[in-house]
Image (cartoon, helix red, strand yellow):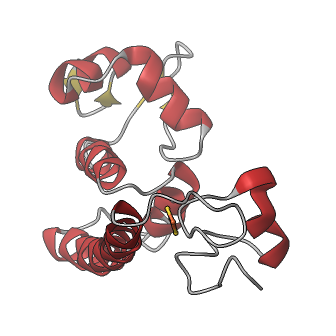
Amino acid sequence: MASSHGLSIGYLAERTGLAVSAIRYYEAQGLLEPWRNAGGQRRFHRADLRRLSFVMIAQKFGFTLPEIREQLSSLPGNRTPTKEDWARLSEGFRVHLDARIATLEKLRNDLDGCIGCGCLSLPSCALYNAGDRAAKKGQGPRYLMGDSPGT
Ligand code: FES
């Protein structure tokens, strides 16, 4: 229910299309901060509707929940976020998407080399990473970051 006393979790679920359990999970992950009314029921801010929209969109862009939580932490805590606040936050989507496209293009180029090869060589094929040897080179997708499997 929507009222001046905050929104119920059922109302949030109805408006966003999310399951109540999903909203509880997001709350447990620190993405929402409801309060309890005198009856002990969770109450959410109206701005949480937009907050949940942001979470759903950010997940589509491949952000993890900890990353989304970090982004949300930059919103002003002393007032309801404005449209401009959300627009600023959404600019990060573009940067993230460009980086993902660059990574996928690199992967596609590696794949093009392999399509004509077919060796599936353990020491030299960029697409093969037996025993997670790349992990010894550091965190992240090492071969896509420029490391060579042969070194
Ligand atoms: S299949 Fe030969 S280098 Fe990948």
How many numbered tags mark residues here?
Answer: 0
Which image quadrant: the N terminus? top left
Q: Is residue 145 left or right of residue 72?
A: right
Q: Is residue 16 shown left or right of residue 20?
A: left
Rendered residue at 46%/16% (across/down): 21
Q: Nearer the viewer, residue 85 or 59?
A: 59
Q: Residue at x 76, y 56 (%)?
A: 132
Which is more toward the observer, 146 or 92? 146
Name the foreground residue: 12 vs 17.
Answer: 17
Q: Residue furthest right?
A: 136
Give coordinates of residue 128: x percent, y percent.
Answer: 60, 58
In this rendering, would 147 be left or right of 26? right
Q: Is 59 rendered above or below residue 28?
A: below
Quarter of the image containing the C terminus?
bottom right
Image x and y of residue 134, in percent: 74, 68
Q: Position of residue 86 (x, y in %)?
A: 23, 68
Q: With respect to residue 57, does 97 lie above or below?
A: below
Where residue 96 sits, quadrant-wise, is bottom left
Is residue 41 placed above or below 48 in the rendered structure? above
- Quick one: 106 or 98, which is closer to the camera? 106
The correct choice, above or below, for 103 with respect to 33 in the image is below
